[in-house]
Amino acid sequence: MSRHANDRSAIAALVRPTEVHRDIYIDEDVFQLEMKHLFANCWVFVGHDSQTPNKGDYFTTEIGTQPVIMVRHSDDEIYVLHNRCPHKGTKIAIDRAGNTGKFFRCPYHAWSFKTNGCLLAIPLRKGYKDTGLEESESVKGMAPVGAVKNYRGFVFARLAPEGVSFEDFFGSSLSSIDNMVDRSPAGRLEVAGPPLRYMHRCNWKMLVENQTDTCHPMVAHESSAGTAIKLWEEMEKPEGTKKPMAMEVIAPFMSSYEFFENMGIRTWPNGHGHTGVHHSIHSDYSAIPGYFEQMCEAYGEDRAREILGENRHNTVYFPNIMIKGPIQQLRLFKPISANKTLVESYIYRLVDAPDMLLQRTAMYNRLINAPTSMVGHDDLEMYERAQEGLHSDGLEWVNVQRLYQPGESFEQEAIENGTTERQMRNQFDAWTKYMTMTMDEAAR
């Protein structure tokens, strides 16, 4: 272990009120401590229940670097289990998704388990007679994670057996998920196909920070969004020609500093926050024929206007997801190592809403987040340059000081100027809290 080891004071010293130490991004030992403490103590997104609609359906993923299985049991409930056999440790499921029927069967020695993890059968079990098997951990079956919560279809889990409750961890920030789901006339979402997956050679926190960094779009995206706007403006077209959907999606990335300042940033305790309090890059999309009428029928006109009038930009749920309610998207930043992150970009269908909404969502995902996207490569180059640059011994600290207010607290919800770096500081406040939390503190 490095000098950081398990020393709580050494970990806490990596974060100052207006700056963070470069080791947070580049030190592999710090990364391993994040996997051991941060991702165990926080509530981490696992998947959406529409990915496992039928009994026996399962989906494999990771919480931090821990392999887990999300599965729908015979009681129709969602369980999240550690993806390992309690016998020899073999991964039970290696396919991304499937249906296992009524039980899981280990491919090594055929131990089998109910879909809630309970041990079902062991071949030649008589060989364990009088060995003390019944007192061992193995006989309990596939280990469940510490706690699971299905919130309006979004499944979260906490690895630690004791700790902060789901409600206390997220608090009022759940309003962003509520708005995203309420945009469906039926009040339900469904995952639309597999995610776009995109490997980044950088630390996972760089991507999380970037979701509320509003001083970079007009700079970093000038080569993509700026070029697209220029080509559209120079194109010969009849007067009054309506912008195509692709231009509506990409043009707002070149909005002015003033636009982003005025849109505001809201922060909540525990590292959660969102851009777009007053307006966002999603505010001025063209209306989809028939959609408002469907919403009025489902919710009444006043409530429909309230739902659709909320156009939050990026909502960060600490530690590692971002959702966009108006565009029905979720991005999951999966840590691989200190300098490698896999990004999975999911889109959702609003049940009973016009198909054109899903068309726009899919277009946004392709243009902005795909490995072949126009905009995503701008960000990727900045992340990778930063990951390389942080190895320079010129400076050891990274500045997150913009619009800092001495003595600021993150214990209460706050709304600030849209270009503040307060949300980044909020994330590092939560990072310190959950990295240094003892088991006794977690239990409280």
Image: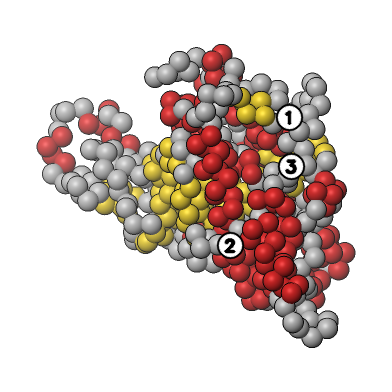
Which mark is nearer the camera, 3 or 1? 1
User: Callout 2: 10 Å neighbours few (<14), some, many (20+)?
Assistant: some
Name the N-terminal-most of marks 3 and 1: 3
- In the picture, measured across the screen, residue 144 lies left or right of residue 440, that is left
With respect to residue 247, does 163 lie above or below?
above
Q: CA distance from mark 2 to mark 1?
A: 30 Å
Residue 202 in the image: x percent, y percent? 50, 41
- At horizontal 67% and vertical 64% (from top left) the residue drawn is 227
**Residue placed most toward the observer, 8 or 255:** 255
Amino acid of disc 2: Met
- In the picture, measured across the screen, residue 231 lies left or right of residue 412, that is left
The residue to which callout 3 is attached is 172
User: Callout 1: 10 Å neighbours few (<14), some, many (20+)?
Assistant: some
With respect to residue 27, does 385 lie above or below?
below
Which mark is nearer the camera, 2 or 3? 2
Q: How many marks?
A: 3
- At horizontal 80% and vertical 49% (from top left) the residue drawn is 257
Amino acid of disc 3: Ser
Disc 3, SS: helix
- In the picture, measured across the screen, residue 402 lies left or right of residue 302, that is left
- At horizontal 67% and vertical 61% (from top left) the residue drawn is 225
Q: CA distance from mark 3 to mark 1?
A: 26 Å
Amino acid of disc 1: Gln
State which quarter of the image contains the N terminus: top left
Q: Which mark is residue 374?
A: 2
Residue 331 in sight:
yes
Residue 203 in sight:
no
**Residue placed most toward the observer, 1 or 173:** 1
Residue 337 in the image: x percent, y percent? 43, 37
